[in-house]
Amino acid sequence: MFAAENGLKGDPRLQAISEAIRVVPHFPKQGIMFQDITTLLLDHKAFKDTVDIFVDRYRDMDISVVAGVEARGFMFGPSIALAIGAKFVPLRKPRKLPGKVISEEYELEYGTDCLEMHVGAVQPGERALVIDDLVATGGTLSAAIRLLERVGAEVVECACVVGLREVKGQRRLNGKPLYILVEPRQMDNCC
């Protein structure tokens, strides 16, 4: 579900967030319109508005865990977690976390990847939010959901700053709601 379809229709913050995201054509390969959220982070107002919209949505949902997907989920997750009184749990690529971890592999367009989380970071029965910058196929979010559910967490929702109107992998989210702020832009008017 898009924020504009859930009470924020016409909210000027959404337009500002969208405009703050730079589009880089043909990166990392031909045909890809890369949605570069680093320019959103440079715009303190748009960045704050992004976090505020998520905080307003999740403040009263009794979420105790905000799980951020490496690496760009780390840019939004901690601020949201602090504001709603939850802990932040990083979901990392393999061999990035010291100590004992639990892992979940997932399919990519060409090959596989893996997310890891510290053993004991999430307790059974905790209510979790998964946050990332962008969703396209849903593969990474699906792996995050499986990882959290394997330790007994209840995944309340997944949230992304940017997402396609028809996420190809929505069915991969096992019925978990998906909240998206803005659609990807196709071209950039910036230099």
Image (spheres, grey):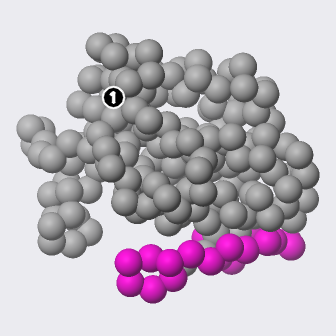
Residue 105 picture location, percent across and down = 62, 77
Quadrant of the frame with the N terminus: top left
Residue at the spot of label 1: 17
- The quarter holding residue 66 reads top right
- Tally of marks: 1
Decide: is 1 above or below 138.
above
Decide: is 169 above or below 79.
below
**Is residue 97 found inside the magenta-colored segment of the image?**
yes
Residue positioned 72% across, 19% down in the render: 60
> Which element is circle 1 on?
helix
Name the residue at the bottom extreme. 111
Apparent side of residue 19 relative to residue 158 in the rendered image (left or right):
left
Apparent side of residue 82 relative to residue 168 in the rendered image (left or right):
right
Disc 1 marks which amino acid?
Ile
Apparent side of residue 59 relative to residue 4 in the rendered image (left or right):
right
Q: Is residue 118 visible?
A: no
Residue 49 picture location, percent across and down = 45, 21
- The quarter holding residue 46 reads top left
Q: Which residues are magenta?
A: 92-112
Residue positioned 26% across, 69% down in the render: 28
Quadrant of the frame with the C terminus: top left
Apparent side of residue 68 relative to residue 165 in the rendered image (left or right):
right
- The quarter holding residue 79 reads top right
Q: Is residue 109 visible?
A: yes
**Is residue 140 found inside the magenta-colored segment of the image?**
no
Residue positioned 81% across, 71% down in the render: 101
Decide: is 108 above or below 45.
below
Local crowd at mark 1 within 10 Å, few (<14), some, or many (≥20)? many
Residue positioned 34% across, 16% down in the render: 9
Residue 112 picture location, percent across and down = 51, 82
